[in-house]
């Protein structure tokens, strides 16, 4: 079972991985979903101070897991430039951790409207399925991205931070500054941070890239990112309005019954 635990992808047998949306992938997704729901229910039952401690614990776990991954890559001689945490989800580890200890609007906005959908997309279309289930890269991929999704969900449902579309310039400004820098790094080192130079393996963008080329892919990719950010604002606003109506209705009923 642990034969290939520390084996890097280029040393693995060709049939060691598994398929996107295959039984193993779907089982991982179901497990992540159940864990997030259970943690969310328990989180809401905790006091505010206990919630803060739990979020800080998640932050420390994420940082420790990333340090472990980097250490294993260095020790096994597989540390490459592209393994630096400069993908959106790699940066999300530090953004969410910083938000826990130094909360502010920029970090909160980016955590809720960029990190959440980015990590969720990575879970749905993972690029680490070439690894067997019992491999540190596979385990790190699912567990880390599961936490990256759970963290902003806990922040949102507890009301510790509420995004506002008036602050949409914050995530947009981040991408506007980071994307050109990372694109240059990708061109220089042959990396693919944030998938700016080519689509992730197994993602729907592969079809656009193969059929219409890089220019069309980049245009569709950027438009999709912006659309997702807008959808996050719309979805969060809609859920808040619905929750407000439900709470007001319950309060009105309680008031009528108490008269």
Image (spheres, rainbow, N blue to C red):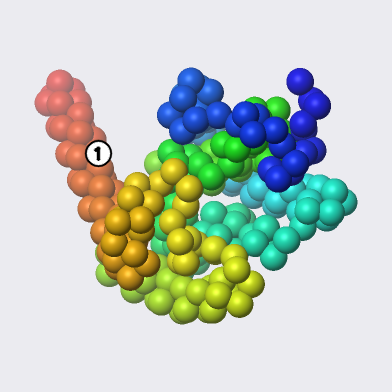
* Residue 91, percent from left and from top: 57, 61
Residue 192 as seen in the image, left or right of residue 112: right
Mark 1 burial class by Cα count in 10 Å: few <14, some 14-19, many 20+: few
Residue occupied by mark 1: 243
The residue drawn where x is 69% and y is 65% is 81
Q: Which of the two residues, 184 or 35, is positioned nearer the viewer here?
A: 184
| In the image, residue 34 above or below residue 120 | above
Q: Quick one: quadrant of the N terminus?
A: top right
Q: From where the camera sits, is residue 167 visible? A: no
Total labels drawn: 1
* Residue 157, percent from left and from top: 40, 41
Q: From where the camera sits, is residue 22 visible? A: yes
State the image quarter where residue 143 is shown.
Answer: top right
The residue drawn where x is 75% and y is 41% is 11
The residue drawn where x is 80% and y is 27% is 3
View extreme (right): residue: 75
Residue 213 as seen in the image, left or right of residue 181: left
| In the image, residue 215 above or below residue 209 | below
* Residue 74, percent from left and from top: 83, 55
Residue 170 as seen in the image, left or right of residue 135: left
Residue 77 as seen in the image, left or right of residue 207: right
* Residue 218, percent from left and from top: 35, 67
SS type, badge 1: helix
Q: Quick one: quadrant of the C terminus?
A: top left
State the image quarter where residue 250 is shown.
Answer: top left
Q: Which of the two residues, 254 or 56, is positioned nearer the viewer here?
A: 56
Q: Which of the two residues, 195 or 102, is positioned nearer the viewer here?
A: 195
The residue drawn where x is 35% and y is 56% is 210
């Amino acid at each position: 079972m642990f034969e290939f635990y520390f084996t890097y992808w280029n040393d693995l047998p060709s049939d060691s991985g598994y398929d996107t949306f295959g039984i193993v992938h779907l089982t991982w997704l179901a497990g992540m979903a159940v864990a997030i729901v259970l943690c969310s229910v328990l989180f809401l039952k905790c006091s505010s101070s206990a919630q803060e401690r739990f979020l800080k614990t998640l932050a420390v776990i994420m940082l420790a897991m990333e340090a472990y991954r980097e250490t294993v890559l260095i020790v096994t001689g597989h540390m490459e430039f592209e393994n630096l945490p400069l993908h959106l989800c790699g940066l999300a580890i530090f953004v969410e951790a910083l938000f826990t200890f130094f909360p502010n609007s920029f970090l909160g906005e980016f955590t809720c409207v960029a990190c959440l959908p980015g990590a969720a997309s990575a879970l749905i279309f993972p690029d680490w399925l070439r690894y067997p289930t019992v491999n540190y890269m596979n385990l790190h991929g699912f567990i880390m991205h599961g936490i990256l999704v759970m963290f902003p969900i806990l922040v949102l449902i507890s009301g510790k931070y509420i995004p506002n579309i008036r602050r949409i310039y914050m995530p947009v400004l981040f991408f506007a500054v980071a994307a050109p820098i990372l694109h240059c790094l990708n061109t220089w080192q042959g990396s693919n941070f944030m998938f700016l130079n080519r689509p992730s393996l197994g993602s729907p963008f592969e079809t656009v890239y193969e059929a219409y080329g890089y220019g069309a892919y980049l245009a569709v990719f950027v438009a999709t990112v912006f659309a997702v950010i807008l959808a996050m604002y719309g979805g969060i606003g809609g859920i808040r309005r619905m929750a407000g109506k439900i709470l007001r209705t319950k309060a009105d009923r309680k008031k009528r019954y108490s008269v």
